[in-house]
Image (spheres, helix red, strand yellow):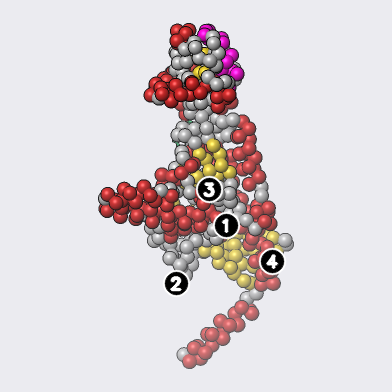
């Protein structure tokens, strides 16, 4: 008994000299989320993906997304690297080693190859494994969970397969602008070495701003499809603290787009700039003041966390990431959030131009040309309509026999309607301020210089399309001394005159408006 007690440690110490082989264990992810181990290792998954082709012949287990075949428990796979033979085996760790359910891949090789295996072979395996995983995977759309459960293997994100059909081909926007964004993405994707050399985290920020329905979310989908990246869509209002935000970021992978939509709605980013008004409101209601102050503090905290992740010490985590913010109100955002370096590219998603319309017409109607294109082009210069609304017009009668005619006719009607509304609104505005208009008109008697200011000009872009009679209104203001156009609606130019002469006729108005443009 005493002999056994003294012999055992000796034998254990001698054993490595007798066995020239070394074993490295690469364990699978723990099935719990340990508090001191905030990032679970990816090595196991990468090695598994690397070994997958070798296992393909006789593996019984299909694992995860795509088809990553992993070695069965006890199965051994031989490999060779630079003339050195190594052996992989899948085992289940014994009692006392992490979780019992956790698998482990053991790499065995001769001791004299330790340097080569650790320094070159393992990084090579991980790199190829990563590439295989990237190629095999189904892309995912992640969203943060409401309650972050640190004891669950599902951790902080839930996901679905990402299958959005929008691509840059189907995205309607001006081709030059589109090209610029695609070039920027290409540059980013291929600049790993460049970012390393200049000492910058390999990430890029995009701010997409514009009215609702102009394609900001569609643009994100197009970017993800173009780059073959996953999307992490963060719902900031569900993130209670900066600590949780950090955990979310840590659990994102590279080759991904991190999206925060409607950032101005998620955070009270203007709070500290509008201190005066909130204080006034608070004075009237102390409870509201308290709630407001609390909200403001939380927002400021979250903003600081956000800034930290976009550009701070955590921003380099896992590399090759794009961060996209969207907003309908770019002017409301805190300048710190959108400064260069954080948001590297600002993209205005604007109302539908003719070039964008042609993309939609091709997508929805399969038409590259049509007699109504001219009218649409003309009206799009004058009327604001979102690509979403244009798409809606082009979709409606898709199944009718003469689909393109009907759909384009509908679009023209919609544009006319909007032009009318726009004109009526302007006329109402003019009617509401007759005194000001009169003053302007009197000023304008002095000469043509005031016209150049364009304060009350007819919008020339609305005119060629409208069918209206202006002669009556023109006669009533015939004594005006110079060209003045004060307000217009679609049927009636309120006042158009020239020096000492009554102006008549649509053609003249068109010419004049052309001059004023
Ligand atoms: N530029 C575009 N090209 C192609 N389709 C578009 C474009 N803009 C909008 N659409 C169509 O309109 C729908 C809504 O667009 P999207 O959700 O991308 O707009 P958004 O700018 O994100 O709006 P919001 O500000 O309300 O979030 C899309 O599903 C798409 O069908
Ligand atoms: Mg959107």
Q: Position of residue 515 (x, y in %)?
A: 60, 18
Instruction: Tell me the element at label 2.
Output: loop
In terms of depth relative to the viewer, which is nearer, 336 or 352?
Answer: 336
Residue 116: assigned label: 4
Mark before the other along the chain sequence, 1 or 4: 4
Residue at image location 47% in from the left, 34% down from the top: 211
Mark before the other along the chain sequence, 1 or 3: 1
Residue that numbered label 1 is attached to? 316
Residue that numbered label 2 is attached to? 96
Residue at image location 59% in from the left, 30% down from the top: 174
Task: Nearest to the eye among marks 1 and 4: give it.
Answer: 1
Q: Is residue 50 above or below residue 139?
A: below
As measured in the structure, the alpha-carbon distance from the residue carrying label 3 to the one carrying label 2 is 50 Å
Instruction: Report if residue 515 lies within the magenta region.
Output: yes
**Dot 4, crowdedness within 10 Å: few (<14), some or many (≥20)?**
few
Q: Are marks 3 and 4 in contact (CB under 8 Å)?
A: no
As measured in the structure, the alpha-carbon distance from the residue carrying label 3 to the one carrying label 4 is 46 Å
As measured in the structure, the alpha-carbon distance from the residue carrying label 2 to the one carrying label 1 is 35 Å
Q: Is residue 437 above or below residue 69?
A: above
As measured in the structure, the alpha-carbon distance from the residue carrying label 4 to the one carrying label 2 is 31 Å
Task: Nearest to the eye among marks 3 and 4: give it.
Answer: 3
Residue at image location 42% in from the left, 62% down from the top: 32
Task: Nearest to the eye among marks 1 and 3: give it.
Answer: 3
């Amino acid at each position: 008994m005493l002999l056994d007690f003294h012999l055992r440690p000796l034998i254990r110490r001698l054993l490595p000299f007798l066995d020239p082989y070394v074993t490295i264990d690469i364990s699978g992810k723990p099935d719990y989320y340990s508090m001191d181990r905030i990032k679970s290792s990816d090595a196991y998954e990468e090695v598994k993906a690397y070994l997958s082709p070798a296992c393909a012949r006789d593996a019984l287990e299909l694992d995860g997304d795509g088809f990553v075949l992993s070695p069965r428990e006890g199965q051994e796979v031989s490999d060779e690297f630079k003339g050195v033979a190594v052996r992989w085996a899948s085992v289940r760790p014994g009692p006392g080693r992490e979780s019992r359910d956790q698998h482990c891949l053991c790499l065995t090789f001769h001791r004299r190859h330790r340097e080569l295996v650790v320094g070159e072979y393992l990084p090579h395996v991980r790199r190829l494994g990563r590439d295989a995983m990237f190629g095999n995977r189904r892309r995912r759309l992640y969203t943060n969970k409401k309650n972050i459960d640190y004891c669950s293997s599902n951790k902080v994100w839930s996901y679905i397969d990402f299958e959005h059909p929008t691509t840059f081909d189907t995205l309607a926007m001006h081709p030059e602008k589109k090209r610029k964004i695609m070039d920027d993405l290409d540059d980013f994707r291929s600049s790993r070495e460049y970012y390393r050399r200049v000492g910058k985290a390999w990430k890029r920020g995009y701010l997409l701003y514009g009215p609702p329905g102009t394609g900001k979310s569609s643009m994100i989908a197009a970017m993800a499809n173009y780059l073959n990246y996953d999307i992490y869509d963060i719902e900031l209002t569900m993130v209670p603290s900066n600590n949780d935000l950090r955990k979310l970021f840590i659990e994102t992978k590279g080759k991904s787009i991190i999206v925060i939509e409607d950032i101005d709605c998620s955070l009270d980013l203007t709070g500290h700039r509008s201190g005066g008004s909130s204080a006034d409101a608070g004075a009237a209601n102390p409870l509201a003041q308290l709630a407001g102050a609390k909200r403001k503090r939380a927002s400021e905290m979250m903003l600081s966390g956000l800034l930290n992740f976009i550009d701070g010490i955590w921003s380099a985590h896992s590399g090759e990431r794009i961060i996209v913010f969207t907003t309908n109100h770019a002017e409301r955002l805190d300048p710190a959030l959108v400064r260069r370096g954080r948001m590297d590219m600002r993209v205005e998603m604007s109302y539908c131009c003719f070039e964008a319309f042609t993309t939609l017409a091709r997508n929805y109607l399969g038409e590259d040309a049509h007699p109504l294109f001219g009218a649409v082009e003309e009206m799009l210069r004058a009327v604001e309509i979102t690509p979403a609304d244009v798409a809606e017009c082009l979709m409606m009668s898709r199944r009718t026999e003469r689909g393109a005619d009907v759909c384009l006719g509908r679009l023209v009607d919609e544009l006319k309607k909007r032009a009318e509304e726009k004109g009526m609104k302007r006329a109402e505005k003019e009617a509401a301020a007759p005194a000001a208009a009169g003053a302007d008109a009197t000023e304008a008697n002095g000469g043509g210089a005031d016209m150049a200011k364009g304060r009350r000009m007819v919008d020339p872009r609305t005119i060629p399309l409208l069918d209206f009679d202006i002669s009556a209104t023109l006669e009533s203001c015939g004594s005006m001394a110079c060209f003045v156009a004060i307000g217009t609606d679609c049927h009636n130019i309120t006042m158009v005159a020239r020096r000492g002469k009554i102006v008549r006729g649509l053609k003249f108005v068109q010419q004049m408006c052309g001059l004023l443009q």
